[in-house]
Image (cartoon, rainbow, N blue to C red):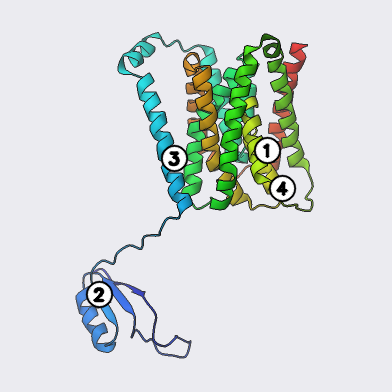
Amino acid sequence: MQPPIVSTTGLANDPLTPKSALDLNGLTINIQGDNASVQADVLRSAFPTATVQTGISRPLLRKRNRTEIAIYFFSALALMIVGHLLFNYFTLNRLTLIASTIDLTPEFFYFILAGFVAQMIDGALGMAYGVTATTFLTSVGISPVFATASVHSSEIFTSGVSGYMHLKFGNVNSRLFKVVLIPGVIGAALGAFLIVKLADVKVIADYLSPAISVYTAILGILILKKALAKPTKKKPIKHIGLLAWFGGFVDAIGGGGWGPIVNSTLIASGRHPRYTIGSVNLAEFFVSFASSVVFALYVGLGNYGMVILGLILGGMIAAPIAAHLSRRLPVKTMMILVGIVVILVSLRKIIKFF
């Protein structure tokens, strides 16, 4: 026979102390089980002022605040827009045509490898997905504009899943999220627009690739410095909105930097790592979405569908592995390796240009 389940809500008439007898008078008691009715009669006779129920109690629904409602609303709106664009582009006829013309060249598996490595690093460190993937793509000759556009398009999926999980597990500080969201989105949109316009100027376009390589090398040095830095006195950041704007701006231009710039700076200033990473990662979905919309409107992504698909597939394969290994691998060692790899690949591109 299943034992009864008893749950109580309300306030007792007299507070219980270690020496006092159990007094259920004044409480609301809910009993579930095969012999719930029998036990209910016993409790009613023993405690006349107690309210004894044998039905299923209503679940307690937490009231959502305005920030959570806004997050769910804009997330649903963004997913609707993405779904609309995908279904308009990937029609049945077009999917059939694509399937018949797909040529799985060795480069496609290189894109999968790039997505895999980038997601493994991001899963272990909470950053460096963009800079790692961009470094991989530019090393095979993809222009900086389409490299950063492809990375941000694929990052919509990875950051969306990551942000949702952080929100679900309560890792999001609503106040910090609101502070970094709007400036980050504005900075990302402006950065994407600027790099598109710069790519149209031939003189600037010729020097854009080595300039991006210099930027990724600097980010590699920043990651390496974070790994080797000794603990110092924490200093609070006053202008977090400006930091988010700068992070979104350079992230769109260079294909990465939102995590290394925003996350690392806030954590180094004394912010709680759990809520910082959760809030910034959730905002990253909207930042990546904003820059991807600008890239799609001004340069188009049709010719780089295989690049984006490869990055997404590689990231999907790596995501569960990275989540498992993140608990076992030493973060400091991973950061050092990531910094060294990014610096070496970036320097190779710079030396090759000259």
**Is there a contact, CB below 8 Å, between mark 4 and mark 3?**
no
Rendered location of residue 232, percent (x, y): 79, 51
Q: Does 72 appear above or below 216?
A: below
Query: Which tag, 3 or 2, sits closer to the chain's start?
Result: 2
Q: Nearer the viewer, mark 1 or mark 2?
A: 1
Left of 156 or right of it: where is 57? left
Q: Is 195 positioned to the left or the right of 343 in the image?
A: left
Structural crowding at the residue carrying mark 2, measured as other residues with C-alpha within 10 Å and reported as few (<14), some (14–19) or many (≥20): some
Return the residue nearer the eye: 235 or 151: 235
Q: Which amino acid lies under the numbered mark 4 shown in the image of this protein?
A: Ala
Mark sitting earlier along the chain (1/2): 2
In the picture of the structure, the residue carrying the numbered disc 3 is 75
> How far across and down, in percent of the image, does residue 138 sit?
63, 18
Residue 325 appears anywhere in the view: no
Which numbered disc, 3 or 2, marks the residue closer to the eye?
3
Q: Mark 1 and mark 2: span between their CA atoms? A: 56 Å
Q: Secondary structure at mark 3?
A: helix
Numbered mark located on residue 261 in the image: 1
Front tag of 1 and 3: 3
Query: In the displayed structure, does residue 128 sit left or right of residue 152?
Result: right
What quarter of the picture does the N terminus occupy? bottom left
Q: Disc 3 marks which amino acid?
A: Ser
Q: To which residue does mark 4 refer? A: 268
Is residue 89 something one can see in this rendering? yes
